[in-house]
Amino acid sequence: MNVKALAKADLNLLVALYVLLEEGSVSAAAKRLSITQPAMSKTLARLRNTFDDPLFVRSKRGIQPTPRAELVGAELKPLLSKIETLLDGEDFTPASYRGEIQIAISEYVGISLLPPLSAKLQQLAPKLRLKTITRVENQLHQLATGDLDFAIQLSRRDYPKEYRYQSLGNSPLGIFVRRDHPLIGQVITRDNLSYFPSINLYVSDRMESPQLPELPAMGERVGMLETSHLLTALEVLRETDYTLICPAYLARNEGATRDVVALPLPTEDAQSVDYTLVAHERTRRSAIHQWLWNEILDTVRNMRIRTVHRG
């Protein structure tokens, strides 16, 4: 791209050429642009100099475009329309939006939220490309740089003023085990937990989320598996005596947690985790971002309502 040449160009000349082509008359074009006819004639002279072409020749019908003017004119309308959109903002409609939105979301949140959200998007914004990323560190920085559009994360105590955020609610933690695990039917204590290996589910930006305290050590564990893949963790649970501590709401997903049950943490270790939807202020005036922000919140609200009705 020749930036220097573009910097010398006058956008008003292209607008004038477009009007001249539509009106076929210097005086009519001048009237439409609210300038005098001499000023319009000077503009036409500048156009001829810019394109090194007469552009128009006189005839009994007024002025007739040259082949060069017709060639340029064919490109002018879509070009000026795009410039108008850039300056004024496009009328946003979800059904026609074709862009991509990137969301940082953990797998155990996504497995509950994404199915109902995707069903809505398929109906309301079928051309939207939604990209979810489960392992994302430094999420606030990536929101600021535009590498992310939204993050659904463990809540922080404070957010810098350039971020907007909305609580999505909380969930108690539970201990997930296979349906016939030796712990079934027992009172769960740190001591009896210590006899079974555990799965540590990777959480992005965990060190940046001080609201989630570390679980107390529960004795000498006999082994541990760390993974960021929830479905893998659940398959391991079904085949072994491993335990997994994660949000208890996951138990509502009967498909994912087939043959897996959630047990309460020991009383002294009971705690909940809070989730927050976060975006950077740079997206506040973006129609698609504002729309999707509201759709996410609405989906979460509906999920809560269904949970209450089931209860």
Image (spheres, helix red, strand yellow):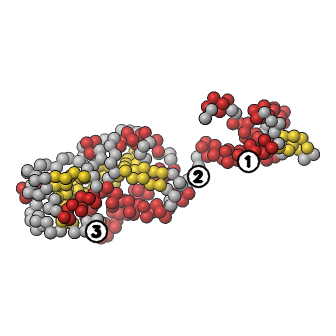
The label shown at residue 234 is: none
User: Hey, which quadrant is residue 295 in on the image?
Assistant: bottom left
Which element is circle 2 on?
loop
Q: How many marks?
A: 3
* Up/down of 25 relative to 247, above or below: above
User: Hey, which quadrant is residue 48 in on the image?
Assistant: top right
Q: Quadrant of the N terminus?
A: top right
Q: Mark 2–mark 3 contact, CB under 8 Å?
A: no
The label shown at residue 91 is: 2
- Near mark 2 (Cα within 10 A), the count class, few <14, some 14-19 or many ≥20, is few
Mark 1, residue position: 74
Which element is circle 1 on?
helix
Residue beneath the point at 21% across and 61% down: 236
Residue type, numbered disc 1: Ala
Report whether residue 32 is seen.
Answer: no
Separation of disc 2 and disc 3 at Cα? 41 Å
User: Hey, which quadrant is residue 42 in on the image?
Assistant: top right
Residue beneath the point at 75% across and 32% down: 50
Residue type, numbered disc 3: Glu
Seen from the viewer's position, the closer of residues 224 and 162 is 224
* Up/down of 167 relative to 7, above or below: below
Residue type, numbered disc 2: Asp
